[in-house]
Amino acid sequence: MNGAALVVLMRWPRRGEGKTRLAARLGADAAHALHRAFVADTLAWPAPRPRLLAVSPDTAAVAAARVVAPDAVVVAQACGDLGVRIASALDAALGCGADRAVIVGTDSPSLPHRLLRACLDAAGDGAACMVPALDGGFVALAVGRSAAQRYGFDWLHHGGIAWSTKHTAMSTVDAAARAGLAVHTTAPWYDVDELGDLPRLHADLRQDPGRAPRTLRRLDRLGVAAAADLAS
């Protein structure tokens, strides 16, 4: 696994599981269809190709192996909080020989290639880099092998990071700094959790339809104007 590795941390799409906030407004079937589209589009990004897929629940790892790129490594997510799961997946990718690894979820199918590339490039100098999320989290985190060897990943799961809050990105940077690791940041992007996120996602994908074509088709069928009315 030479060069840069894209690591995808994902929940396997199952009806009634995940996307609960969308399901509460759109219904279970529509939310499940969107979830499937988010996953399929993220796994189909042309560059960098997914190289390692960390799946939850672990019983879905075999099924996931049948739908990802042939050269991807599929592993079950580690047990623990989000920091443990991120650290384990990044460590696995770097352990397979990648020079740099960037981890993403599947909630940002419109994340531009330019931001992923900028994140990876900034992690090539012994530092880390993140794409911050507009809600205070982050949508991508990249680490180079030299930084991982020097600083390890304890700062991700023993650094007191406030996961799933508006302070997540800031506390992640602070935890890394206490370990001696600098974390650069790119321009921010957004993830999709709420009904009110769908109109922007739809507009962005109309500008760049090739980034997430399955998601765009689902949003076209859903009728984002109607979704926006529900969110208001």
Image (tube, rainbow, N blue to C red):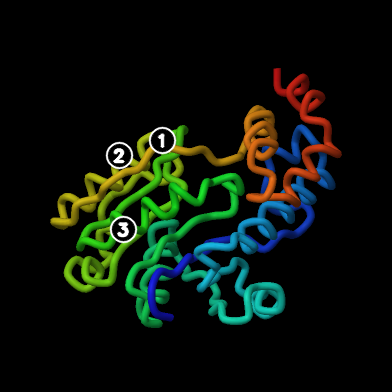
Q: Residue at x 58, y 61 (%)?
A: 10
For mark 1, does the 10 Å Cα neighbourhood hold few (<14), some (14 to 19), or many (20 or more) residues?
some
Q: Secondary structure at mark 2?
A: helix
Residue positioned 45% across, 43% down in the render: 164
Residue 119 vs residue 55, the one in the foreground: 119
List the residue tagged with mark 2.
170
Estimate how packed mark 3 is, as few (under 14), some (14 to 19) or many (20 or more) residues with alpha carbons within 10 Å. many
Q: Vertical placement of 229 versus 101: above or below?
A: above
Pointer 3 residue: 156
* Labels 2 and 3 touching (C-beta < 8 A): no
Of label 1 and label 3, which has the lower sequence position? 1
Q: What is the three-letter code of the residue carrying label 1?
A: Gly
Amino acid type for the residue under numbered disc 3: Leu
Instruction: Check contact, mark 1 vs mark 2: CB within 8 A.
Output: yes
Residue 110's spot in the image, x, y percent?
Answer: 59, 45
From the viewer's perspective, is 185 left or right of 178?
Answer: right
**1 is higher (above) or lower (below) than 90:** below
Q: Residue at x 59, y 62 (%)?
A: 46
Label 1, label 3: how many angstroms apart (C-alpha)? 17 Å
Image location (x, y in percent) of residue 86? 42, 62
Name the residue beneath numbered marker 1. 136
Gap between marks 1 and 2 measured at Cα: 8 Å
Disc ID at residue 232: none
Left or right relative to 166: residue 60: right
Of the numbered discs 1 and 2, the one sitting upstream in the chain is: 1
Please say if the residues under marks 1 and 3 sit with CB atoms less than 8 Å apart. Answer: no
Q: Is residue 152 left or right of residue 211?
A: left
Closer to the camera, 183 or 24? Answer: 183
